[in-house]
Amino acid sequence: MTTALLLLPDFALILLGAAIRRWMQLGDHFWNGVEKLVYFILFPALLINAIVRTRLDLLAALPLLGTAFAAMAGGMLLGLLPRLLLNMPALTYASMFQCAYRFNSYIALAVAGMLFGAPGIATMGLIVGAAVPLANLVSVWMLARHGEVGLWREVARNPLIWGTATGFLLNLAGFVPPAPLQAFLGRLADASIALGLIAVGAALRLDGFAGVRKFAAWLVAVKLLALPLIAMVVGRWFGVSGLNLQIVVLFAAMPTASSAYILAMRMGGDGRSVAWLISATTLGSMLTLPLWAACLLDS
């Protein structure tokens, strides 16, 4: 119950975003601008600010990242299984498949910060920075026959990767930001969480579902239940413990990223089904995330 209350402000911001989108009629142009501001400016500042201020253990990061990749690989394998059983269009399957392992960075960093402060954000930032290229590579590979996109260019220009890499290099160099710069980054970081979660809520779509319902239900269960369980088992097997184990399990329990919809649409995929899955996993995570967090904090 205590954990659910800790996460309540973050979920309330998501629901507020959905309400604002529905009742204030601000238009798609406004929300596109908010998403770009958060993605290219505010979240990189959040990552740099957290990573620079946190002492990083490089040796501990290897099993941590190995656990995160194992959880994503588990999602990919579980996402492949229904392909053998269900008769569905290849393009629809390729579009929905990515929802089994992609993750919402906004919610991940917000939850990590709410529960564990700057060390949590720094640890989650390392995982996100390493996992984003893998998620993009696999997703584009599955959709590649149906469209073209500059994969390596997108990965190289991803602001979450660059924000993580910049903070990591500054941390290793022993750089201590002067007080005015710390305050500047801190203000941007504070704004990133609220605006990022409101943008997630504004993107919720549960109407017009056109995909395969059995496959969709399977993917929701895989993303919210199977992946965090895989991360917990593999992490303990790798010797991951404490904050690192808590963060990597929460990472695995994240809902699907909204960028999955953007990629599906850009490559001519089934965007409507992907949008439904993103919304379903986001709303479902409001129930499952507090349970996983409570399990981790009590263990």
Image (cartoon, rainbow, N blue to C red):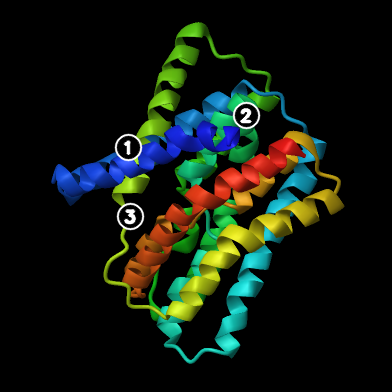
Q: Quadrant of residue 207?
A: bottom left
Q: Position of residue 125 (x, y in %)?
A: 59, 38
Of the residues shown, which amino acid type is indicated by label 2? Phe
Of the residues shown, which amino acid type is indicated by label 3? Leu
Label 2 vs 3, first from the N-terminus? 2
Q: Is residue 278 above or below residue 285?
A: below
Image point (39%, 67%), residue name: 274
Describe the element under mark 2 as helix, strand or loop.
helix
Mark 3 or mark 1, whichever is nearer to me:
3
Q: Report whether residue 36 is seen.
A: no
Of the residues shown, which amino acid type is indicated by label 1? Leu
Left or right: 215, with 176 as reference point = left
Image point (48%, 48%), residue name: 286
Q: CA distance from mark 2 to mark 1?
A: 25 Å
Q: Is residue 25 above or below residue 257?
A: above
Give the residue number, with chain letter if any, for mark 2. 116
Label 3 vs 1, first from the N-terminus? 1
